[in-house]
């Protein structure tokens, strides 16, 4: 099982990170040890600036390679909600030196995942609302209509380089509003107003 994450897939997030808006999907990968089911998340001791990034997640339902965009919708049948935790201080140091970001993105438990739902239950996939609240306060609000690269485009693009297999997860990008988390925070993620993910930061 692979965890594939799309970076800078919302224009406003790219701006807040002072990054260029990409002209093609940017992706990186996390190991399966980064996956965390709902419950408790412990801030690792190697970062002093851990940021939340709430994301809609696609679950691949059958294997595919070099998938044409017009057929990409046949390769995922469920959508869920996840968080791409990022050690922002470590990421900044890696950027300064032109090094890969794995230390900042792919550490253990850095990819919490919540519940999934059949995509048909969400209606228009180009109009999915999602939100992250911390301690009851809204921190990130997004909608799939603002994706730079659609779900189908992302699936098609990734499959040119990496064979997708059943059970693979694609984190599709985060909207603006990323920020730090701290011990004691209670995080809750929503899709179309329904709770899909809860996390206690320890």
Image (tube, grey):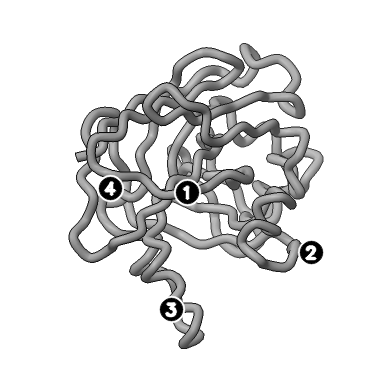
Residue 24, x across and y down, in percent: 75, 62
* Marks 4 and 2 close (CB-CB < 8 Å): no
Label 4 element class: loop
Label 2 element class: loop
Which picture quadrant has residue 90? bottom left
Residue 32 vertical placement versus 115 (above, below): below
Q: Earlier in the sequence, mark 4 or mark 2?
A: 2
- Which residue bears the numbered disc 3? 94
Q: Residue at x 63, y 43 (%)?
A: 175
Q: Quick one: 43 or 180, which is closer to the camera?
A: 180
Residue count near mark 4 (Cα–Cα under 10 Å), binned few <14, some 14–19, many ≥20: many
- Which residue bears the numbered disc 2? 23
Tell me the distance, in whole angstroms, between the alpha carbons under discs 1 and 2: 25 Å
Residue most extreme to the bottom: 97
Q: Earlier in the sequence, mark 1 or mark 4?
A: 4
Nearer the camera: disc 1 or disc 4: 1
- Which residue bears the numbered disc 4? 109
Residue 41, x across and y down, in percent: 24, 40
Tell me the distance, in whole angstroms, between the alpha carbons under discs 1 and 4: 18 Å
Quarter occupied by the C terminus = top left
Q: Quick one: 181 or 40, which is closer to the camera?
A: 181
């Amino acid at each position: 099982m692979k965890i594939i994450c799309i970076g800078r897939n919302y224009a406003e997030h790219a701006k807040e990170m002072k990054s260029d808006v990409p002209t093609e999907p940017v992706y990186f990968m996390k190991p399966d040890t980064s996956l965390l089911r709902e419950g408790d998340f412990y801030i690792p001791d190697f970062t002093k600036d851990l940021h939340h990034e709430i994301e809609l997640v696609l679950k691949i339902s059958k294997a595919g390679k070099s998938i044409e965009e017009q057929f990409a919708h046949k390769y995922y049948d469920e959508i869920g909600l996840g968080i791409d935790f990022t050690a922002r201080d470590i990421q900044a140091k890696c950027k300064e030196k032109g090094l890969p970001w794995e230390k900042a993105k792919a550490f253990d438990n850095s990819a919490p995942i919540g519940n999934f739902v059949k995509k048909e239950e969400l209606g228009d996939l180009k109009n999915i609302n999602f939100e992250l609240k911390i301690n009851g306060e809204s921190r990130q609000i997004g909608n799939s209509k603002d994706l730079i690269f659609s779900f189908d485009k992302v699936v098609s693009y990734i499959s040119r380089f990496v064979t997708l297999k059943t059970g693979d997860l694609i984190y599709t990008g985060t909207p603006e509003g990323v920020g730090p988390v701290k011990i004691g925070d209670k995080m809750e993620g929503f899709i179309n107003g329904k709770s899909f993910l809860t996390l206690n930061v320890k």
